[in-house]
C-alpha cells in the first residue's frame, strides 16, 4: 500500500502528484538577477528526482531586495526568458514550477556564504538597505533607511510587477516570502518594527504590509493557481513575533484567499535561541493547520522517509518541504518511495535503476 506521502493533493487547479516539495534555496549564482545553466540543472535535477513541486529560490522583486549580488531577480522583463526554459523543463518531468518572491530589507547587501556573509558597502558592490525602522540586523553595521510612504508604495508595485512577470515565465505556484527576517517579517515583528504610523505598533498595523503585498500579488496572479505564504512562526526571542500571532495572521490570510502557509521560524534577530532538533518546526505547522483551518507545509530537519510520512499520515501538515536533504539527494522522492515501498513514476531514462 502506498504511503500517504505519495498521495496526490489538488490545490486550486493544480494537482501535485505527491506531498514532497523542494524548498526555495538560494544558490548565490546569478549575475544581475539572471538565471544561468546552474539554476536549470539544480532545479531540473530535483524535478527529475520526483518531487511534486519545485519552488525557486527567493527571487528579488527589486535590485535592493536581493540578499546578495548573486541572488536571482525578476525586476526586469529580460529575466523572463531563462525562467521560461527552466519551468518548461520542470513541467516536462511531471513536476510543478513555483517561485518565491522576496525582498530582503535590512538583511540585503551581503556577500555570499562562501565569501563570509559580510555586509557589503557601495564600494564593494553593495547598496543601501531599507527596513520598517532604522535598526540594523547587527549593531556594528550601517543602519537601514526606514521606508517612507513612497518607499512602501514602491515595494507594493515591485511585488505586483514581479507577479506579472512570474505569470509570463510560466510559474504555477506563487509563494510570498514573509519569513526569515526579510522585509515583510521585519514589519511583522515588534523587535524590528518600531514605527508609530499605520504600519507599526498593533498587530493589525504590523501585518498591514504583508496583507497589502498579498493583495498586490493577487491583482496579477491567476485566481485558479495556488498562492502560498511563508512565515516564521516565532522569532525565538522574547518580545518578538510568536505562534499565537502566526495563527491569527494565517486565519486572515486564508480569508484573503491564500491556499497554504509554509511554516518556518526564526532568522529575524542575531540573538535568537532555537532548540534545533528533528521536526522542531513541525508543531507550528500542526498548530496553524488545526487552529487557522488552512493547509500547511512543514519544514526543518526532516531527513528520512518514515519521518516525512508520519507528518502527513498524522495530519500535522499537508506537504513536507525539503532543503538540505534535497541537496544531499536530488532524487529524494524516488529514494523515499523505495524506502516506503510506495509506487511513484520514475523518469523512463532512469527506470533501469528502479529495482
Image (cartoon, rainbow, N blue to C red):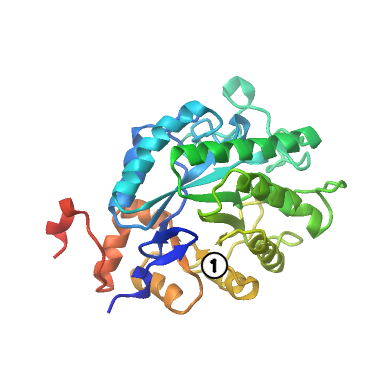
Please report the residue visible at 46 percent of the width from the left and 36 percent of the height from the top. 28
Q: Residue 94 at x, y = what percent?
A: 31, 54
- Circle 1 sits on which residue? 295
Figure label count: 1
Please report the residue visible at 54 percent of the width from the left and 66 percent of the height from the top. 296
| Along the line of sight, the residue nearer the viewer: 16 or 333 | 16
Q: Residue 158 at x, y = what percent?
A: 63, 35
Q: Residue furthest right?
A: 196
Which of the 4 image quarters holds residue 247? bottom right
The crowd level at tag 1 (other Cα within 10 Å; few <14, some 14-19, many 20+) is: many
Q: Residue 291 at x, y = what percent?
A: 64, 74
Q: Is residue 351 left or right of residue 57?
A: left
Q: Is residue 197 left or right of residue 260?
A: right
Please report the residue visible at 51 percent of the width from the left and 28 percent of the height from the top. 77
Which of the 4 image quarters holds residue 290? bottom right
Please report the residue visible at 61 percent of the width from the left and 20 percent of the height from the top. 123
Q: Is residue 57 visible?
A: yes
Q: Is residue 137 left or right of residue 14?
A: right
| Along the line of sight, the residue nearer the viewer: 256 or 332 | 256
Q: Is residue 46 left or right of residue 300?
A: left
Mark 1, secondary structure of its residue? strand
The quadrant in which the C terminus is found is bottom left
Q: Is residue 60 visible?
A: no
| Along the line of sight, the residue nearer the viewer: 294 or 167 | 167
| Along the line of sight, the residue nearer the viewer: 115 or 225 | 225
Q: Residue 104 at x, y = what percent?
A: 62, 41
Amino acid at each position: 500500500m502506498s504511503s500517504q506521502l505519495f498521495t496526490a493533493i489538488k490545490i486550486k487547479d493544480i494537482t501535485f502528484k505527491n506531498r514532497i516539495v523542494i524548498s526555495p534555496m538560494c544558490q548565490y549564482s546569478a549575475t544581475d538577477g539572471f538565471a544561468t545553466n546552474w539554476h536549470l540543472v539544480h532545479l531540473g535535477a530535483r524535478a527529475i528526482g520526483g518531487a511534486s513541486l519545485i519552488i525557486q529560490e527567493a527571487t528579488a522583486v527589486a535590485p535592493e531586495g536581493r540578499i546578495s549580488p548573486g541572488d536571482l531577480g525578476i525586476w526586469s522583463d529580460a529575466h523572463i526568458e531563462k525562467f521560461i526554459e527552466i519551468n518548461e523543463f520542470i513541467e516536462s518531468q511531471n513536476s510543478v514550477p513555483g517561485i518565491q518572491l522576496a525582498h530582503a530589507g535590512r538583511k540585503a547587501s551581503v556577500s555570499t556564504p562562501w565569501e563570509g556573509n559580510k555586509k557589503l558597502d557601495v564600494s564593494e558592490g553593495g547598496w543601501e538597505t531599507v527596513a520598517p525602522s532604522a535598526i540594523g540586523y547587527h549593531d556594528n553595521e550601517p543602519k537601514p533607511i526606514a521606508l517612507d510612504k513612497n518607499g512602501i508604495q514602491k515595494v507594493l508595485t515591485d511585488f505586483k510587477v514581479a507577479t506579472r512577470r512570474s505569470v509570463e515565465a510560466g510559474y504555477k505556484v506563487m509563494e510570498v516570502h514573509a519569513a526569515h527576517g526579510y522585509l515583510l517579517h521585519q514589519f511583522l515583528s515588534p523587535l524590528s518594527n518600531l514605527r508609530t504610523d499605520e504600519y507599526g505598533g498593533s498587530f493589525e498595523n504590523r501585518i498591514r504590509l504583508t496583507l497589502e503585498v498579498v493583495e498586490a500579488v493577487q491583482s496579477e496572479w491567476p485566481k485558479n493557481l495556488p498562492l502560498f505564504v511563508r512565515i516564521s512562526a516565532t522569532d525565538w526571542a522574547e518580545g518578538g513575533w510568536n505562534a499565537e500571532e502566526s495563527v491569527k495572521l494565517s486565519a486572515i490570510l486564508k480569508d484573503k484567499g491564500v491556499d497554504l502557509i509554509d511554516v518556518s521560524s526564526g532568522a529575524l534577530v542575531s540573538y535568537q535561541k532555537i532548540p534545533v532538533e528533528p521536526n522542531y518546526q513541525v508543531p507550528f505547522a500542526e498548530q496553524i493547520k488545526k487552529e487557522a483551518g488552512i493547509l500547511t507545509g512543514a519544514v526543518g530537519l526532516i531527513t528520512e522517509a518514515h519521518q516525512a510520512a508520519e507528518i502527513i499520515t498524522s495530519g500535522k501538515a499537508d506537504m513536507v518541504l525539503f532543503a538540505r536533504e534535497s541537496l544531499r539527494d536530488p532524487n529524494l522522492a524516488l529514494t523515499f518511495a523505495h524506502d516506503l515501498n510506495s509506487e511513484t513514476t520514475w523518469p523512463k531514462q532512469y527506470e533501469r535503476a528502479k529495482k
